[in-house]
């Protein structure tokens, strides 16, 4: 029993469409291309609007994160710099940034290899960076249940503008008790840009 080749069918249809376009007058061809472009823009706008209704859990990749027991009960601060963080913005263009995690472990600490797999998994995700910073924050809190987590994401300039988003579990508005308060006098531009990774 012979099977039809879907690629052959698509190639045949493609050739038919091209032949049809070639037979159209120049103005009619422009109108056809403009119609296709208009339909694509409308479809993209509809898809973007639908994304706004999705909960943060739609983008969650928490299942990729692994945790290891905290080897000590003594308090310590861990800073993790992710110098390359990529995803697809809501305008279907790649966004590039970096992230700094300030982590006060409780019972569990972060298995770093899984964190690398986790951050790379967002490369094809279509999402705003404001949403993505919240997704990462919520994933890390859910998996590791730290005493404190501060997430900072700075985006590379686009159109001459850069932006930084920060979430701190110590903030009362995020359910914290403001035990640390070291963020209240934070006057630097992006928290971790000024000194660079070597002086973190």
Image: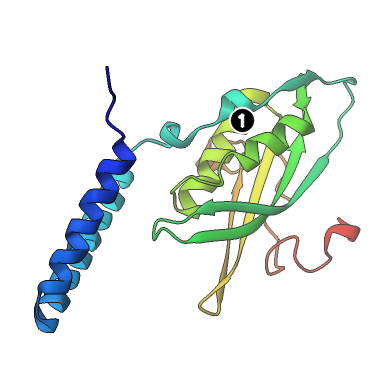
Percent across and percent down for residue 170 are: 64, 40
From this view, report whether residue 151 is shown above or below residue 161.
above
Percent across and percent down for residue 167 are: 59, 47
Tell me the residue at 75%/65% (across/down): 193
Tell me the residue at 65%/46% (across/down): 151
Q: Nearer the viewer, residue 122 or 189?
A: 122
Q: Is residue 147 left or right of residue 9?
A: right
Percent across and percent down for residue 24 are: 10, 75
Say which quarter of the image contains residue 54: top left
Tell me the residue at 55%/80% (across/down): 160
Q: Quadrant of the N terminus?
A: top left
Q: Is residue 166 left or right of residue 81?
A: left
Percent across and percent down for residue 135 are: 52, 39
Q: Secondary structure at mark 1?
A: helix
Tell me the residue at 11%/73% (across/down): 23
| Residue of label 1 | 141
Q: Nearer the viewer, residue 197 or 27?
A: 27
Say which quarter of the image contains residue 149: top right
Say which quarter of the image contains residue 101: top right
């Amino acid at each position: 029993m012979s099977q039809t080749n879907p690629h052959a069918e698509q190639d045949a249809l493609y050739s038919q469409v091209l032949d049809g376009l070639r037979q159209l007058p120049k103005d009619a061809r422009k109108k056809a291309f403009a119609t296709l472009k208009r339909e694509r823009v409308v479809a993209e706008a509809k898809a973007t609007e639908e994304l706004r209704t999705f909960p943060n859990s739609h983008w969650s990749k928490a299942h990729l994160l692994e945790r290891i027991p905290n080897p000590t009960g003594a308090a310590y601060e861990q800073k993790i710099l992710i110098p390359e963080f990529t995803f697809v913005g809501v305008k279907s263009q790649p966004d590039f940034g970096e992230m700094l995690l300030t982590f006060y472990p409780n019972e569990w600490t972060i298995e770093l290899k899984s964190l690398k797999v986790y951050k790379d998994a967002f490369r094809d995700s279509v999402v705003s960076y404001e949403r993505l910073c919240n997704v990462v924050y919520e994933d890390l809190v859910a998996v590791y249940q730290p005493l404190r987590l501060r997430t900072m994401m700075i985006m590379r300039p686009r159109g001459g503008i850069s932006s930084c988003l920060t979430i701190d579990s110590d903030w009362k508005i995020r359910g914290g008790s403001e035990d640390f308060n070291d963020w209240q006098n934070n006057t630097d531009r992006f928290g971790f840009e000024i000194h660079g990774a070597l002086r973190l």
